Image (cartoon, helix red, strand yellow):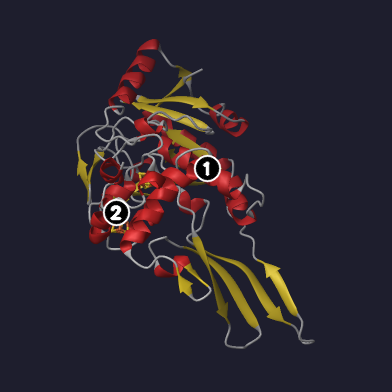
Amino acid sequence: MNHFLAREDFPHLLSALTQAGYGCVGPQIRQGAIVFDHLHSVTQLPQGWQDEQQPAHYRLQQTDSPYWFNWSNGASAIKPYTFAPQENLWTVQRDQSGRLRFQATLPQPQKTAIIGVRACDLAALALQDQHFLHGKHVDPYYQARRESLLLIGVNCTHAAATCFCVSTGDGPDIRQPYDLLLSEIAAGFLLSSGSTAGATLAAQLPLTPASDAQQHTAQQRMQAATQQQRHLPAKPPLFAHLDHPHWQTVGARCLACGNCTSVCPTCFCHQAVEIPDLDGDTSRHERRWDSCFQPGHSYIHGWQIRSNATDYYRQWLTHKLAGWHEQFGRSGCTGCGRCISWCPAGIDLTAEVEQLV
Ligand code: SF4
Ligand code: SF4
């Protein structure tokens, strides 16, 4: 059942989270973009701000609206909170007898509540869970971070021009597991819990039953975010078009910067780097985000399989939109649109797919 939390009572949620031992993270404005960062007060939330996104374009505009979550997304998804951009996995040390001693360096993350998670990012998290947790080998580094999270989703009420989660089936309303779910209306939030931890928190809040009028308003606001300009076919047959001349056209525009893979909430490629100490007895093994747009990504045994932007882009798109169906049973795209906005060349995967199939 939906409850109502008045806007002026939202600080009670922050207090309840703090008392339960969670550090809070929420949306804030940094350098002209909405990002997730430590949240201590509701005054840090982006009240009245709305994003305007187009290919290679991201701007924030202030409005006089009372809303804190009336934007679609920012550059950073919640990916860094589970899959760290850079982390030490283990160290190896030579002891006095000359034997090598390996020591895993598992993270010990603080319990963290992320406030304002979007539908597309929860769908991406479910995909990352499939990769890191539900495969043959569980990744204990990802697992430790994942288990430290409490997820407070907020349904979208505004779709940027780059959003297409409706066509991927991932939004704008939240469809994946959450701990608490919020829908924002002018006076406050409709709130429902989706886990025991969420229900325990909700029980500490000054909630009232949501009225029919409040539920209707929330539904109408969410409906506004279903009006999306872009669309992606469910399973574009890209493997049947590997020699299409449009790969060359898009490759000529691509700068191979890797922005698209960095901002993508589902990309999980990484590289392993050995960092030997100058003492000659110690070495660290580090995992860093990698990108299929980097030359080293396809290097094996003295041979680089892909060496130009056309090949990089074809690899990225065919894997994400076609290969993932075989690996994970669905597309690797949840329609967040970030790779469109943050591509400096304005490359738009929805438009490229239209040309390719
Ligand atoms: S491919 Fe692009 S639109 Fe799809 S999830 Fe990744 S960043 Fe978002
Ligand atoms: S598609 Fe765009 S964001 Fe991705 S590597 Fe090429 S230029 Fe960079």
Identified at 36% across, 54% down, the residue is 314
Q: What is the C-alpha distance between the residues marked 1 and 2?
A: 22 Å
* Mark 1 neighbour class, 10 Å CA radius: few under 14, some 14 to 19, many 20 or more: few
- Whichever of callouts 1 and 2 sits on the residue coming sooner in the sequence is 2
Residue drawn at (34%, 50%) of the image: 75
In the rendered picture of this protein, how many numbered marks are placed on residues?
Answer: 2
Task: Give the residue type that dot 1 points to.
Answer: Glu
- The residue under the point 47% across, 60% down is 85
Q: Is mark 1 within 8 Å of ligand 1?
A: no
The image shows residue 276, relative to residue 10, as above or below, that is below
Residue at figure coordinates x 67%, y 49% from the top left? 136
Which residue occupies the foreground of this view, 68 or 154?
Answer: 154
Q: What residue does disc 2 label?
A: 247
Q: Which residue ends up furthest to the top in the rendered image?
A: 212
- Ligand 1 in which quarter: top left
Marks 1 and 2 close (CB-CB < 8 Å): no
Residue 86's x, y, as percent? 50, 64
Q: Is residue 183 left or right of residue 87?
A: left
Residue 88 lies in what quarter of the image?
A: bottom right
Which quadrant of the structure image shows residue 307? bottom left
Query: Is residue 40 visible in the rendered structure shown here?
Result: no
Front-most of residues 348 and 336: 348
- Residue holding disc 1: 326
Q: Viewer-proximal residue, 305 or 324?
A: 305
Q: Position of residue 291 (x, y in %)?
A: 42, 61
